[in-house]
Image (cartoon, helix red, strand yellow):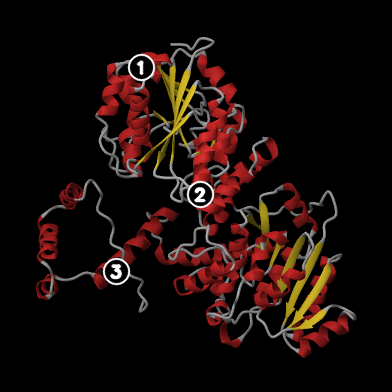
Amino acid sequence: MKLQPGAKRAAIFVYFDPDGMVDSYIPVWVSAVRRHCSFLLCVVNGTLKEAGQKALEACSDRVVYRPNEGLDVTGYKEGYQLLRDEGVLCEADELLFFNQTVFGPVFPLGETFDAMDGQDVDFWGMTRHRGMDVDPWGTIPYGYMPPHIQSYFFAVRKPMFSAAEFDRYWNELPPIHSYLEAVGIHEVCFTKHFADLGFRWDVYVHTEQLEPYNDYPLMGMPAEVLRKTRCPVVKRKSFLTGRTAMNAVPQGGAAAELWRFLRDNTSYDTRLISENLTRTAPVADYTEVLGLFCPPMQTPRQPHSLTGVFWLQDAQLAEATIRAAQKMAPAQQVFLCANAQAQAALLKGLPGADCRLTDREPLEAFSEMLNEVSSEYVCFLPTVTPPADDGLRDLNVFLNAALALCETPPLFAAMEQDASLGLIAPAPVSHLSFVSQGVRWNEQYAAVLGQLKAAGIDHIPLLAKKAPLRLFGGAFFARTGAVRRLAQMNFEPQRDLLFDPQDPAAEYLPALCCQAEGLLCAFAAPYEAVCQLLFNRKAQQDELVSLLATPNKCRADQLRFRLSGILQFYYERRHSMTLEQAYAAKLSAKEKLWIILRLLLSEKSFSRLYKLCHGGRPLAEPDYPPDLLD
């Protein structure tokens, strides 16, 4: 069936937010779809705050609320049944289902609907997945993944949605308990199920030419998909999926390439993306995935005001600090000196400079004078030299920061180019103890959380099990407004953790303040520093691989699997009971029955029994406690 001019389209939009919020990208997306519909129903899983309710009411014809159960699939089901029962579908020629998991429209949706209106199909979607020969999750009834339309955006025409088979499909859809069930039971099966019944389908975005290089081009090669097909949407998870979690072109750089394409080649406001990411995701996650980097040798289009703040403790480094300050000029400059010797050394090289004595730690001293800063930008460069082996001090942290931040024209240009950027940090050093970030985060979490609360920051995700972004050495270049909340913090409580010489928790705070303002973090480093970082990482990787790799098991995923298996084996032996221990222990009858059933049944049978007894909820992996004796 082709749609004729004047055809009517009804739409169902399903939405969920754990905080009851509606970010700005949602009304932009829904309003754009609504312009091509005669009726739009919004189905909310859960509840919304008043502002969110008003935002959705303004861009849809009706908003209904249901319990947050069954994910978007069940929302689609109940939305369809509502429109069917109230007669809305009697007047519709096409029924559209879509959700919140994409940003858009990147290109006009009219192009999409105009193209697909002329296609003689019964149902269609925006994109498809080419399928796989296996069932990666164990939830697909076919035992493999057939090619399928992806369920974030698909439309069904009257001959199909008025057929008894369509109604039967939704009526017989089993309860959905997890994302993997939603994909395996509904998304993957929907296309094949109706194609086998004789209904014809197609997609707007064809990626067959790219599939020899990537099995999921919308995620693995998103910028190229937009460039070749004018696909009007991008997946939100493009900015949240780990750099090595899937194949991509360029590997690890697909999200950054997509970001630059959206920023430089479309009219889509990337601040809509940063607003959502900074509210809903840990700063370390999206910062690592995006990996935004300031290109060198760029010059700003206009002059900007800058305040450079330096902190010096070791008088021996006064000369290096002066060189950094002279390179940063022109800028208003303040020097915070931890002792009289450092102050005297600075004044000898910079007579008349604003040199102030302070007994505060670097970030604490900076925060106390931050309210004096009226410039558009601020650069903080402490001459921090963390403890190293054999009683030495590590000078690399300061030198790395000075090289990255004192050449300010590229930093100004990057901020001009991207309004979503709030802070630029030196590229992370990668040597000695700096190889691993966040190993003490479980101890530091409460101290950092207390500082955020003191600054009125309670709207960003901070996870106790995952460290946020740490700025080694504490140096950064930022929009002053992005870090202004540092001035509201009181560092006295738990200062031992915040300013621990080896692992100061305060170094997490600047990036979290930036996140609270809805702005992103990027990195800077000159070419020679990037080369150093690259070869440092390669040497470390080679050393680790030499311990774990064998000729037949040398890929990164295989090594990770092997190492996780070793760790699992260790934890099982450390935390699991023997039979003798179980019989001797004071256990309830229910706990004893649990042990007996696990002994008698296979893993697959036990998992099925568990799901049956717990309303379909799958058996969770054991959450072993951290081993402080390891």
CA distance for labels 2 and 3: 29 Å
601, 133: nearer the viewer: 601
Q: Amino acid at mark 1?
A: Met
Tell me the number on the disc at residue 240.
2
Residue that appears at 35% across and 38% down:
183
Q: According to the image, label 3 marks what residue?
A: 571
Q: Is residue 73 left or right of residue 31?
A: left
Residue found at x 35% / y 27%:
82
Sooner in the amino-acid sequence: mark 3 or mark 1: 1
Look at discs 2 and 3 and give the one toward the viewer. Answer: 2
Q: What kind of residue is marked 3?
A: Tyr
Mark found first going from the N terminus, 1 or 2 = 1
The mark that comes first in sequence, 2 or 3, is: 2
Q: Residues within 10 Å of mark 3 (few under 14, many from 20)?
A: some
Which label is found at residue 196? none
Front position in the image: 170 or 415: 170
